[in-house]
Image (spheres, helix red, strand yellow):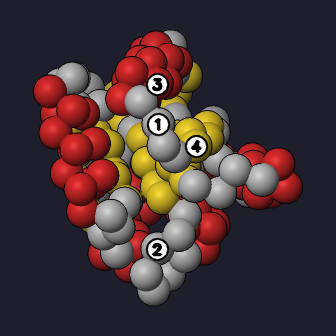
Amino acid sequence: MNILLLEDEKKINDMLSLYLRQDGHTVESFTRAEAALDAFKADVFQVVISDLMLFGMQGETFIKKIREISDVYIVVLTAKTAQESKLSLLDEGVDDYIAKPFSMKEVQLKLRNIEKRLERQETKRFSFEGNTYTLKTPSNIIMKDDDTIDFNSTQACVARVLMDHAM
């Protein structure tokens, strides 16, 4: 899976990146939400893992901005363990919540479960000018015939809306 990791504590960021890559994932890691948001808009990710307490833009704001443009899976890593905080995040569209300190095994298992769901993702097909286009959601992978089209997250969302209304 292509994973965007946003964690401002360098040691945690490096450790998570290393373990996730060893598990076969592609990881783009960031310590600042603004840079992570720019990268998200320029590429396609299947999962976003984000801390909440960050320098600059807070994690909650980052998550709201991601939710405005995508249904990507979002997993939060945070020291905020109050019930109200968890409920608020879930209400904002977070898919999963991991409290710090955490074990890598927990992260690995949760990502494995997300990967299983992505494998069963919904597929929409649309024909236009003799070509067949396929959109796989929620990962936003778009294919023209058998070739993957490199769309960023914003472009994939626009294509999904157009495909939904063309049918």
Q: Mark 1: which secondary structure?
A: loop
Report crowding for label 2: few under 14, some 14 to 19, many 20 or more residues within 10 A (C-alpha): some
How far apart marks 2 and 3 lie (CA) works out to 22 Å
The residue identified by callout 1 is 102
**Looking at the image, which residue sits at the far front?**
101
How far apart marks 4 and 2 lie (CA) works out to 15 Å
How far apart marks 4 and 1 lie (CA) works out to 6 Å
The residue identified by callout 4 is 99
User: Could you tell me which quadrant the C terminus lies in?
Assistant: top right
Between label 1 and label 2, give the one nearer the viewer.
1
64 or 68, which is in the foreground? Answer: 64
How far apart marks 4 and 3 lie (CA) works out to 10 Å
How far apart marks 1 and 2 lie (CA) works out to 18 Å
The disc, 4 or 2, on the residue closer to the chain's N-terminal end is 2
In the image, which disc is placed on residue 106?
3
The disc, 2 or 3, on the residue closer to the chain's N-terminal end is 2
Q: Position of residue 142 (x, y in %)?
A: 35, 38
Pointer 1 with pointer 2, Cβ within 8 A: no
In the rendered view, would you say 146 is above or below 88? above
Q: Mark 2: which secondary structure?
A: loop
Identity, as a three-letter code, of the amino acid under mark 3: Glu
45 or 150, which is in the foreground? Answer: 45
In the rendered view, would you say 109 is above or below 20? above
Pointer 4 with pointer 1, Cβ within 8 A: yes
In the rendered view, would you say 28 is above or below 135? below
The residue identified by callout 2 is 54
The disc, 1 or 2, on the residue closer to the chain's N-terminal end is 2
Total marks placed: 4
Identity, as a three-letter code, of the amino acid under mark 2: Leu
Pointer 4 with pointer 2, Cβ within 8 A: no
User: Could you tell me which quadrant the N terminus lies in?
Assistant: top left
